[in-house]
Image (cartoon, helix red, strand yellow):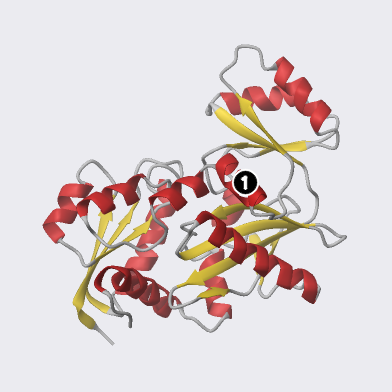
């Protein structure tokens, strides 16, 4: 059914390291929204975005952005000032979710299961001391991540026997601050939350990488490079725990509409929350739309519900 009275603007792209992926997600959302709404526009995130939005005057803005700027609360703040309703989490929740250390501290304070970690300043001249400290803190290995990137950009593994100093020096080429986490071995698991009329945990997904590697940027966005099993084949109590933690993480950060949390589940059943994505990918290989589909929610219906959620917050009615 076409809703002629609601005008939607999809915002994607920008200057982030994930901009190309964002444009693919944005086009998918744009195409699906045209099945439900008579007037849908797609805009590039750039210096003219505010002016373009004022000109279009949409009823709802649908950000489809990955990484900073855009997913980090910056666009959300602009939309708040301009007075446009928008899909997704607000300024604070978006900013907290984007910063891995801040998010983990919030998760930890909420009693959620997270890995041990340490912040690494990559701007110091001699990284040798920090490399030594990390080796002492994480004798079984660690993972180094830029503190404010998504899609596994800049993530590296340091296993026993690897050079921690080389890893930090490589990371320092492109990033200033990183988060080191204990290396937890297990299944790669992800769980989405759909929070429109009510908050619902979507079916859980287990990720298999076909070449025995891990779910890095290339494996996320290359057709056939990974396999997604949804619902995941986990013991029922572990499956329920993953969904519980995903829901609790969504609530702890104050997210709304949608999120997807990533986990490692060890062979002993230990559930470890890694991070939360406040604007999950919407590409043809993305996990969140697959989880919604497994719950019986088509992509067209998913994006429609998200638009009406944002519309209802502002105008006081939901469809």
Residue density around tag 1, few if under 14, some if 14–19, many if 20 or more, within 10 Å: many
Question: Residue at point 74% right, 41% down?
Answer: 116
Viewer can see residue 292: yes
Q: Is residue 282 left or right of residue 266?
A: left
| Residue 162 in sight from this viewpoint | no
Question: In this orientation, which residue lies closer to the viewer: 1 or 193?
Answer: 193
Camera-side residue: 165 or 309? Answer: 309
From the image, which quarter does the C terminus lie in?
Answer: bottom left
In the rendered picture of this protein, how many numbered marks are placed on residues?
A: 1
In this view, the residue farthest toward the left is: 55
The quadrant the N terminus occupies is bottom left
Query: Residue 78 location in percent, x, y?
Result: 27, 48
Task: Give 275 or 48, whichever is nearer the viewer.
Answer: 275
Q: Relative to 123, is 171 above or below? A: below
Check the image and name the residue furthest to the bottom.
1
Residue 254 in percent (x, y) is at 49, 58
Question: Could you tell whether 215 is left or right of 295 in the image?
Answer: right
Where 223 falls versus 96 (above or below)?
below
**In the displayed structure image, the side of residue 122 where residue 232 appears, left or right:** right
Residue that appears at 61% across and 28% down: 171
- Looking at the image, which residue is at 76% across and 28% down? 134
For numbered disc 1, what is the local secondary structure? Answer: helix
- Return the residue nearer the eye: 175 or 256: 256
Left or right position of 13 against 167: left
Q: Residue furthest top?
A: 125
Q: Residue at x 14, y 54 (%)?
A: 54
**Residue 181 locus on image (x, y percent):** 71, 39
Q: Is residue 83 above or below residue 122?
A: below
Residue 89 at x, y percent in the picture? 42, 58
Q: Compared with residue 156, is residue 98 higher up or lower down, i.e. above or below?
A: below
Which residue is label 1 attached to? Answer: 104
């Amino acid at each position: 059914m076409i809703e002629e009275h609601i005008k939607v603007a999809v915002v994607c792209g920008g200057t982030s390291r994930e901009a190309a992926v964002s444009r693919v997600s944005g086009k998918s959302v744009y195409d699906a929204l045209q099945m439900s709404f008579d007037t849908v526009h797609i805009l590039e995130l750039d210096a003219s975005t505010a002016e373009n939005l004022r000109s279009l005057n949409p009823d709802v803005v649908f950000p489809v952005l990955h990484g900073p700027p855009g997913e980090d609360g910056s666009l959300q703040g602009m939309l708040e000032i301009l007075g446009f309703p928008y899909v997704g989490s607000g300024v604070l929740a978006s900013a907290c979710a984007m910063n891995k250390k801040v998010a983990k501290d919030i998760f930890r304070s909420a009693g959620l299961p997270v890995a041990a970690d340490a912040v690494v300043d990559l701007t110091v001249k001699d990284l040798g001391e920090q490399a030594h400290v990390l080796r002492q803190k994480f004798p079984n290995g660690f993972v180094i991540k830029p503190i404010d990137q998504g899609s596994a950009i800049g993530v590296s593994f340091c296993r026993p026997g690897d050079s921690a100093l080389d890893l930090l020096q490589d990371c320092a080429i492109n990033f200033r601050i990183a988060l080191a986490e204990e290396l937890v071995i297990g299944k790669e698991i992800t769980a989405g939350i759909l929070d429109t009329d009510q908050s619902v945990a979507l079916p859980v997904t287990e990720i298999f990488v076909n070449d025995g590697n891990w779910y890095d940027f290339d494996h996320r966005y290359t057709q056939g490079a990974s396999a997604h099993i949804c619902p995941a084949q986990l013991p029922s109590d572990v499956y329920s725990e993953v969904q519980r933690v995903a829901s609790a993480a969504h609530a702890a950060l104050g997210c709304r509409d949608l999120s997807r949390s990533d986990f490692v589940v060890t062979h002993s059943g230990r559930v470890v929350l890694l991070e939360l994505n406040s604007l999950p990918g919407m590409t043809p290989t993305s996990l969140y739309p697959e989880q919604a589909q497994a719950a019986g929610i088509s992509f067209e219906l998913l994006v429609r519900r998200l638009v009406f959620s944002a519309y209802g917050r502002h105008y006081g009615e939901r469809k």
